[in-house]
Amino acid sequence: MAAADNCLFCRIVAGEMGACIYEDDLVAAFEDIQPQAPHHTLIVPREHLASSAEFAPQHEALAGRLLLTAARLAREKGLESYRLVMNCGEEAGQSVFHIHLHMLGGRTFGWPPG
Ligand code: 5GP
Ligand code: ZN
């Protein structure tokens, strides 16, 4: 599972910066540096994948683990209501090109998203 050169989230997963609040064989989680809600956690694959556009059948377990980890962390934080977001591509708002699932909670969210 090669880390991509100059990838911010690969560096965080490698422990070079910031602290992960959860890690297992497939994913890691850490708090967003610029939280958009009282709770804002990012869950990322350990493996470098630029966006969900790169998901392929061999990533089925990884994709499931991302969701299960988000649900587990929300439960541990006592959140009954929360939002999961995965932006794919610049137009959708993706700014870091290493897959990440946002888990946001602790406030009321509007719909449709901006
Ligand atoms: P995106 O816009 O790609 O969906 O989300 C990227 C997220 O990464 C943003 O919410 C942004 O605040 C967060 N982020 C950017 N740089 C860092 C960093 O160095 N550390 C952490 N923990 N989060 C970051
Ligand atoms: Zn990466």
Image: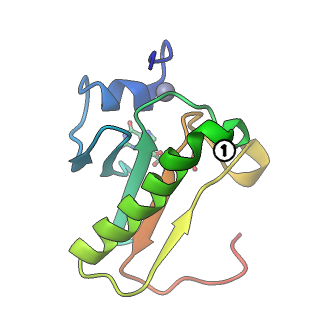
Query: On the image, which quarter does residue 28 sit in?
Result: top left
From the viewer's perspective, is residue 53 above or below residue 76? above
Q: Is 15 placed left or right of 92 in the picture?
A: left
Q: For residue 36, say whether it is visible.
A: no
Q: Give the residue drawn at x 49%, y 12%.
A: 5
- Is the shortest distance between ligand 1 and the CB of mark 1 under 8 Å? no
Callout 1 crowding tier (Cα within 10 Å): few <14, some 14–19, many ≥20: some
Residue 110 rendering spot, x and y as whole percentages = 62, 84
- In the image, 25 versus 82, the foreground residue is 25
Residue 80 rendering spot, x and y as whole percentages = 36, 87
Please identify the residue farthest to the top as the structure is shown: 5
Quadrant housing the C terminus: bottom right
Q: Give the residue drawn at x 52%, y 67%.
A: 84
From the viewer's perspective, is residue 81 above or below residue 45? below
- In the image, 90 versus 75, the foreground residue is 75
Q: Is 5 placed left or right of 40 in the picture?
A: right
The colour scheme is rainbow
Q: Give the residue drawn at x 32%, y 31%.
A: 12
Q: Give the residue drawn at x 58%, y 41%.
A: 59
From the viewer's perspective, is residue 109 above or below residue 15? below
The residue under label 1 is which amino acid type?
Ser
Q: How many marks?
A: 1
Quadrant housing the N terminus: top left
Q: Which residue is mark 1?
A: 52
Q: For residue 2, say whether it is visible.
A: yes
Secondary structure category for the residue under label 1: helix
Residue 91 rendering spot, x and y as whole percentages = 78, 48
